[in-house]
Amino acid sequence: FGDAYRSFVCALAEQLSLVLSQLESLHKRTQSENERKNLLLQAPIATALLTGPEHVYQIANPLYCQLVRRTEQQLLGNAYRQIFPELANTPLLAILDRVYQQGEPFVSNEFLLPFPRGSDGVLEDCFFKFNLEPLRDGNGDVYGMMAVAVDITEQVRARRILEKAHDERA
């Protein structure tokens, strides 16, 4: 081995070591992201992950798909506005924008939303327990949000019937 060849082999070994380190880091990050995705997909509540200022669906678990009456294929990779044009005149889009822009969570225990429940597409008043949690990158910048929702329409209707009956007796 000459000095030039020895230097070349050492430089090559350093580069290989760096590449292997980067691959290991990427593998760990990918494994972590897959674990997070699996947790969201298996969550026992309707959950979705939306990213960017257009609120593009990255993840939607089966309960979320069932709740919004859309398939995973209809949701993933598409923006909220494209998927739900019937909700354009509701306050929900402004709430999504505000969570993304200001990075403040949104929590509602009884959120009224006209929503198509049947296959005919007719909107009816529905009520949701609804949370939006901003997601931040390593720099603290918001890159998306996690949505968690529960349809509480039947509970609200039952409560209102009981309240009305109580008021009539009083």
Image (cartoon, rainbow, N blue to C red):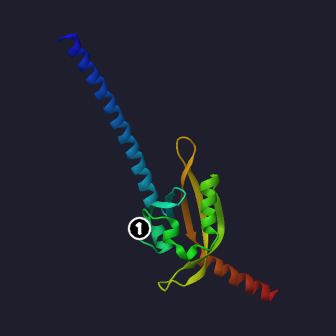
Q: Position of residue 83 (x, y in %)?
A: 48, 71
What residue lies at 26% left-to-right and 24% top-to-bottom? 12
Is residue 166 rendered to the left or right of residue 105? right
Does 42 appear above or below 18? Answer: below
Q: Secondary structure at mark 1?
A: helix
- Which amino acid, mark 1? Glu
Front residue of 30/166: it is 30
What is the x, y in percent for residue 160?
A: 69, 81
Question: As drawn, which residue projects farthest toward the left?
Answer: 1
Quarter of the view holding residue 111: bottom right
Location of the N terminus (image quadrant)? top left
Nearer to me, 169 or 83: 83
Residue 24 point in image, percent of width and height: 34, 36
Whether residue 26 sits left or right of residue 162 in the image: it is left
Which residue has dot 1 on it? 72
Which quadrant of the rendered structure holds the C terminus? bottom right
Could you tell me which residue is drawn at 22 percent across and 14 percent down? Answer: 4
Residue 75 position in % (x across, y down): 44, 67
Q: Is residue 84 above or below residue 28?
A: below
Residue at image location 65% in from the left, 77% down from the top: 156
Residue shown at the point (57%, 46%) measured from the top left: 141
Q: Specify the farthest residue to the bottom.
A: 168
Relative vertical location of residue 67 with respect to residue 106 in this rendering, above or below: below
